[in-house]
Amino acid sequence: MNSHPYLDATRQWVERVVIDLNLCPFAKRELVKDRIRFAVTEADSEDALVWALQEELQRLDRQPEIETTLLIHPRVLTDFQDYIDFLAVAEGLLTHQGYEGIYQIASFHPHYQFEGTAGADAENYTNRSPYPVLHLLREASLSRAIDQYPDVDAIPQRNIQVVDRLGAQHMKALLRTCCEG
């Protein structure tokens, strides 16, 4: 993989936060097997991001060896509310292109905030990434992984407990170290 600051920081986040804290019990296997595609788009508008998203979905169609794609878009949707609003557009693209039920999109953003939480609450760090990311997942693979995992419904609450125990300041510092190398 070519070195690129956005790619490097996002990969560090996957390793140090997502995997080391076990926020996603399925991620380590795919990283070790080199089946996660880290892609940076230079899109600087929502329209350009739609095109980049469509290209990544088509790439997943053509390359079944890629299990999942993290589409990093540091130049667009840096405002969290704009990002949340865009998710409806992204879901619409899935439907319009016939990808509903084939792929799904998970959302990660540096300013992620769950409804009903304060911005400073530690639990928001379960979905905070160094840069805005659209995570494209294959639904069939996700379903197989979920079927083999005991008590998958407990994962979100366990993740909240993990980051709450570490605290918001620790999580903020951990996320910052991902950008420092």
Image (cartoon, helix red, strand yellow):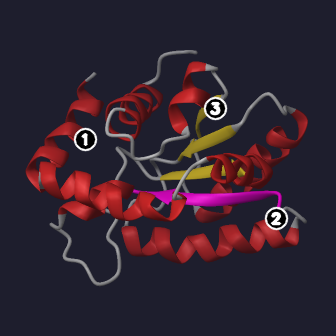
Question: Could you tell which of marks 2 and 3 lies nearer the N-terminus?
Answer: 3
Residue tagged 3: 37
Label 3's element? strand
How many angstroms separate mark 2 from mark 1 (CA)? Answer: 32 Å
Rendered position, 14 above or below 181: below
Q: Is residue 131 left or right of residue 52?
A: left
Would you say the residues marked 3 and 1 are in contact, meaning their CB atoms lie under 8 Å apart?
A: no
Question: What's under tag 3, amino acid-wise?
Answer: Arg
Rendered position, 150 above or below 68: below
Q: Around disc 2, counting alpha carbons within 10 Å, would you say few (fewer than 14), some (14 to 19), or many (20 or more)? A: few
Asked if one can make out residue 146 in the rendered structure from this viewpoint, the answer is: yes
How many angstroms separate mark 2 from mark 3 (CA)? Answer: 20 Å
Q: Position of residue 62 (x, y in %)?
A: 90, 36
Is residue 104 part of the magenta span, yes or no? yes
Q: Is residue 82 left or right of residue 150?
A: left
Identify which residue, 173 or 46, lies in the foreground: 173
Question: What's under tag 1, amino acid-wise?
Answer: Leu
Q: Nearer the viewer, mark 2 or mark 3?
A: 2
Q: Quadrant of residue 120?
A: bottom left
Question: Could you tell which of marks 3 and 1 lies nearer the N-terminus?
Answer: 3
Label 1's element? helix
Q: Around disc 3, counting alpha carbons within 10 Å, would you say few (fewer than 14), some (14 to 19), or many (20 or more)? A: many
* Residue 175 numbered mark, or none: 1
Q: Around disc 1, counting alpha carbons within 10 Å, would you say few (fewer than 14), some (14 to 19), or many (20 or more)? A: many
What residue lies at 75% left-to-right and 55% top-to-bottom? 139
What residue lies at 20% left-to-right and 71% top-to-bottom? 119
Residue tagged 2: 101
Is residue 89 part of the magenta span, yes or no? no
Label 2's element? loop
- What is the span of residues highlighted in magenta in the rendered image? 100-110
Position of the N terminus by quadrant: top right
Rendered position, 159 above or below 74: below
